[in-house]
Image: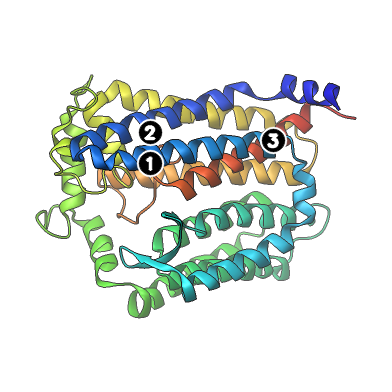
Amino acid sequence: MFNRFKLYLKNFDWIILAAVMLLVVFGLVEIYSVALGQGSVNLLNFQKQLLFAGVGFCGLFLFSFFDAYFLKSLNRYFYALAVIILTAVLLFGSTVRGTKGWFSLAGFNLQPVEFVKLVLILFLASFFSGLATKVKTARHFFLSLLGAGLLIALALWQPDFGSAMILGAIWLLMIIIAGFNRKYYLAVGISVLMIFAVSWLFLFKDYQKERVMNFFNPGANAQESGYNISQAIIAVGAGGLTGKGVGFGSQSQLKFLPEAQTDFIFAVIAEELGFFGVLLILTFYGILFYRCWRILPQVKNDFGIYFLIGGAGLIFIQMFINIGMNLGIMPVVGLPLPFVSYGGSSLVSLLILVGIMENIIIKSKISF
């Protein structure tokens, strides 16, 4: 047992861990900086994030030594649990900023859809890896769509457009990797347009419609619905090369920038640490993606390949959308910057995801 533990540690990808830890540290520094500008009472958020980071890294190490292929065998049970929890939050959950997507427990808010993203990757990786030697038919395509679509519909019902978008993007990425006939992608496009039209007419709240409209012209109503984007763009531009220094960002410290700890923490980093700080953050993400890409040829089974691509894809897509929100090139859909933004559910779920990816990487390097 001890020898196996040593072997796992030897083959652990410490570079991925270092990149993730540095991203978390960046987030903690900026959350602390924002808290200083809002008064000492708000250091509670920094303390909570510190606790979330501790729990998340424990989960990372636990799942890195837990057999990912055993998790594969339980994917249907995890999927069923995800459906039950998303239904339960609609019935018994708390409403935050117009979205009924949280459970309130002992002073903490748990957002189950963050863990559902991980479950969808596990479900689709298991489903598509089982088709590796079979002809991928329309039946397989639409079964996967049905599985993902149910989770997307429950997320839209909250309504949480950002998470629904991420779940849809995960499914789209996985079917592209699976290599279905291109004619099915037309069906995807039509389905997305239909879902968007129905959501616009019956599900979206007024503020969500405003966010989409602000995507096309964020400066049109800079003092009202476009205020967040406008202030984020100002903050990003104000940082220059080296930034104003931690704790000295005028937009965040003087409370001009709303949601500075969550949706717009990238703008805080850009203002306080400048171009070099942003470059450093992007470098850490790049190291994570590069290490995942580099290990793919060594992974011995399709499940591991699908899961690694799905996990890295989730982090990349969410990173891209969040940064796009801060630059005014994407609509504000309430998505955190992975590992950096304040939010326990997002941080813990992503660290567990990295743990499972680490286990797949370890298993690709050793055999018993």
Q: Amino acid at mark 1?
A: Ser
Residue occupying image coordinates x 12% and y 59%: 224
Q: CA distance from mark 3 to mark 2?
A: 23 Å
How far from the left and from the top, in percent, is residue 204?
33, 72
Residue 229 vertical placement versus 17 (above, below): below
Q: Name which quarter of the figure residue 182 lies in.
A: bottom right
Residue occupying image coordinates x 48% and y 76%: 91
Say what secondary structure mark 1 lies in. Answer: loop
Looking at marks 1 and 2 on the same chain, the residue that comes earlier in the sequence is marked by: 2
> Dot 3 corresponds to which residue?
64
Q: Name which quarter of the figure residue 87 lies in.
A: bottom right
> Dot 2 corresponds to which residue?
27
Q: CA distance from mark 1 to mark 2?
A: 6 Å
Specify whether 261 is left or right of 282. Answer: left
Looking at marks 3 and 2 on the same chain, the residue that comes earlier in the sequence is marked by: 2
How far from the left and from the top, in percent, is residue 150?
57, 71
Looking at marks 3 and 1 on the same chain, the residue that comes earlier in the sequence is marked by: 3
Residue 52 vertical placement versus 137 (above, below): above
